[in-house]
Image (cartoon, rainbow, N blue to C red):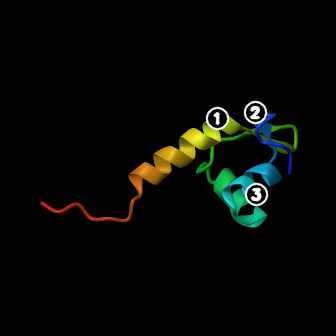
C-alpha cells in the first residue's frame, strides 16, 4: 500500500486496505456504486478525500441506533 499521506489518488488495493475490507468486498461495493470511484481503462482509481467524505457520511447515517419518539 502507498503512503496515503503523500497521495490523493488510490488504487482499489489501497482503498481495500484503508477501509480494512477484503479486495472482493471492495470490488463488489465499487461496481454496485456504493464506493465513489472512477474507472480509467481497466483500472479503478479513487480520490482519498472523496473516500473519507463517503465514509464519514455513511458512518453518520448508519449509527445502528433507533430514534426514540
- Residue beneath label 3, please? 17
Q: Please, is residue 47 above or below residue 61 in the view?
A: above
Which secondary structure lies at badge 1?
A: helix
Alpha carbon separation for disc pair 1 and 3: 15 Å
Alpha carbon separation for disc pair 1 and 2: 7 Å
Query: Where on the picture, by quarter, is residue 20?
Result: bottom right
Query: Where on the picture, by quarter, is residue 52?
Result: top right
Q: In the visual, does 19 lie left or right of 53? A: right
- Circle number at residue 8: 2
Within-10-Å neighbours for mark 1: few <14, some 14–19, many 20+: few
- Circle number at residue 49: 1
Within-10-Å neighbours for mark 2: few <14, some 14–19, many 20+: few
Q: In the visual, does 14 lie left or right of 19? A: right
The residue lying toward the viewer, choosing from 3 and 40, is: 3
Question: Quadrant where the C terminus lies?
Answer: bottom left
Image x and y of residue 26, in percent: 70, 58
Q: Please, is residue 50 above or below residue 57 in the view?
A: above
Q: Which residue is drawn at 82% across and 45% down?
A: 11
Image x and y of residue 9, in percent: 78, 35
Image x and y of residue 12, in percent: 79, 50
Label whose residue precedes the other's in the sequence (1 or 2): 2
Q: Residue at x 77, y 62 (%)?
A: 23
- Check if mark 3's residue and mark 2's residue have beta carbons within 8 Å: no
Image x and y of residue 27, in percent: 73, 57
Amino acid at each position: 500500500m502507498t503512503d496515503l499521506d503523500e497521495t490523493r489518488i488510490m488504487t482499489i488495493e489501497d482503498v481495500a486496505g484503508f477501509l480494512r475490507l477484503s479486495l472482493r468486498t471492495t470490488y463488489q461495493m465499487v461496481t454496485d456504486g456504493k464506493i465513489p470511484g472512477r474507472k480509467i481503462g481497466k483500472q479503478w482509481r479513487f480520490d482519498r478525500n472523496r473516500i473519507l467524505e463517503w465514509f464519514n457520511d455513511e458512518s453518520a447515517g448508519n449509527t445502528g441506533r433507533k430514534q426514540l419518539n
